[in-house]
Image: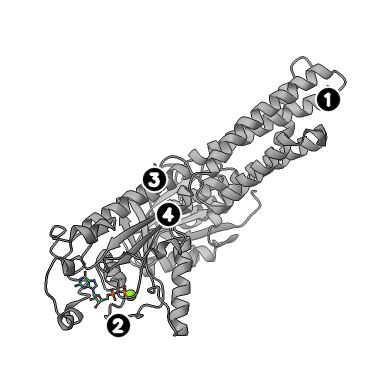
Amino acid sequence: MSHRETIFALSTPPGRSAIAVVRLSGPDVGAVLDAICPPRPEPRRAAVRRLKDPATGNLLDEALVLHFAAPRSETGEDMAELQLHGGKAIIRAVLDVLSKMPGCRPAEPGEFVRRAFGNGKLDLAQIEGLADLIDAETEAQRQQGIAQATGVQSQRFERWRAEVLAAMGLVEAAIDFSDEGDVGDQAVAQAEARARALTADLERELADGHRGEILREGFRVVLAGPPNAGKSSLLNALARRDAAIVSEEAGTTRDVIDVRLDLEGVAVIVSDTAGIRETASSVEQEGIRRTLQAAREADLVVWLSEGAAPLSPQERLHASNSLTVLTKSDLLAGETIDAKRRSHEGGCSGDTFPRTGCGDVSPRAQRDYDLAVSVRTGAGLDELTAEIARRALAAVGNPSDPAMTRVRHRREIETAVVELNVFLTEPARGLELRAENLRLAVAALGRLTGKIDAEDVLGEIFQRFCIGK
Ligand SMILES: Nc1nc2c(ncn2[C@@H]2O[C@H](COP(=O)(O)OP(=O)(O)O)[C@@H](O)[C@H]2O)c(=O)[nH]1
Ligand SMILES: [Mg+2]
């Protein structure tokens, strides 16, 4: 791993700032430090140094310099950190000088992490966690990201893999002892017991309602309902800005418009959609097709309707999780608002609404719905937000409990379960072929952390049978 180029990059965002950090990694780091800021700082001790262009002697900046000697660094290689004053010209001058140093070149995206992986400093699941941590916008995403980046998830993945390896070692032993019937049968029975217990664990894991993915990507809420129900107005009120066009003209919204909210630390994506109705317009039909698509993919469908008779097309949307909301509760509260004034003043989203109580919505009308809201008065909006937050929190569970955060995780675990089930249910295949099923399960689980080394299997077998044999 040492005969490589030394890479460098600005690790803080580009632009003006108090401090800018340039990082380097690779075999020539020491030589670079000797050239631009002698004397080379002691490893892991911060030192203030004048940075100079070795070609001209030109003073570039006074910086805090850190040196991490291999292998005790993030990448496992020699590394350095230059903590510069964060001016654009300083950064440019330093990067310029580095690019002229022998053996040095700018890093490619993710290259530091790739080297860390190559040197066994981080596994794949940790790297994914690190990426999530950097992208985290909400508290729950941060908690999930940090747990995964620090290896909580990887330890579980590794434990599962170790279980299959143990079962495999037993099967291999049974193959070796095939002439001593009893011993072999016992080993196979033990292997089966372990495989069965693990399969149950993995199946439970797969039935987690996608909570890790929902937490990472956002809990998807779709506002659906007939045209003019007040979907776009509600979206704007939830977003506290004019994200969607509000109009008394039915069929205005054709595209799905997304707004991202942070509800009690959980990322929630609320989508406004085209109203569902029979229409001759092909553009509107396309909008409705997208609504139905969004509703199928949603974690929660909020069905809005202003009528006292709730249609129940949410069944047409196949929503497993839904909420029915009566809109424009101010109109039912007996306020007399003529149509003209309504269209003029309506959709006043973006304003701050008096958050009064729910008003006097007629009990008969309200009975058929989970909640009643008025964007006009603000009534019920807090309750609706709280209910969405409650469902989102329920869907993601405890963010620091490890969860599958990617489709990739799910796919590998599914593969492992399939192989384990074949191993368990088809004994007639014979031990050699059944051992192969376990090997495929090990490989799938190994891909979760990027450890797919065949040496592991040998090691496991060796470790089990070396004593007295
Ligand atoms: N009085 C009243 N009018 C509303 C309320 N919400 C929306 N409207 C009006 O109803 C009409 C349709 O609203 P819009 O949000 O475009 O409905 P969408 O078609 O479901 O997106 C507009 O004229 C809005 O101003 C409300 O809470 N109270
Ligand atoms: Mg609309």
| Residue 231 horizontal/vertical position (percent) | 31, 70
* Whole-number angstrom distance, CA of label 4 to CA of label 2: 43 Å
Which of the two residues, 415 or 296, is positioned nearer the viewer here?
Answer: 296
Measuring 48% from the left and 73% from the top, which residue is drawn there?
A: 289
Q: The residue under label 2 is which amino acid type? A: Glu
Q: What element carries label 4?
A: helix
| Residue 173 horizontal/vertical position (percent) | 78, 25
Q: Which of marks 4 and 3 is nearer the N terminus?
A: 4
Q: In this view, does 430 lie to the left or right of 274?
A: right
Q: The residue under label 1 is which amino acid type? A: Asp
Q: Can residue 202 be seen in this view?
A: yes
Tags 3 and 2 touching, CB below 8 Å: no
Which disc, if any, is residue 176? 1
Judge: label 3 CB < 8 Å from ligand 1. no
Which part of the image, by quadrant, shows the C terminus?
Answer: top right
Q: Which of marks 2 and 1 is nearer the N terminus?
A: 1
Q: What element carries label 2?
A: loop
Measuring 71% from the left and 34% from the top, which residue is drawn there?
A: 424
Which of the two residues, 234 or 35, is positioned nearer the viewer here?
Answer: 234
Q: Is residue 261 left or right of residue 415?
A: left
Measuring 46% from the left and 72% from the top, which residue is drawn there?
A: 290
| Residue 58 horizontal/vertical position (percent) | 42, 66
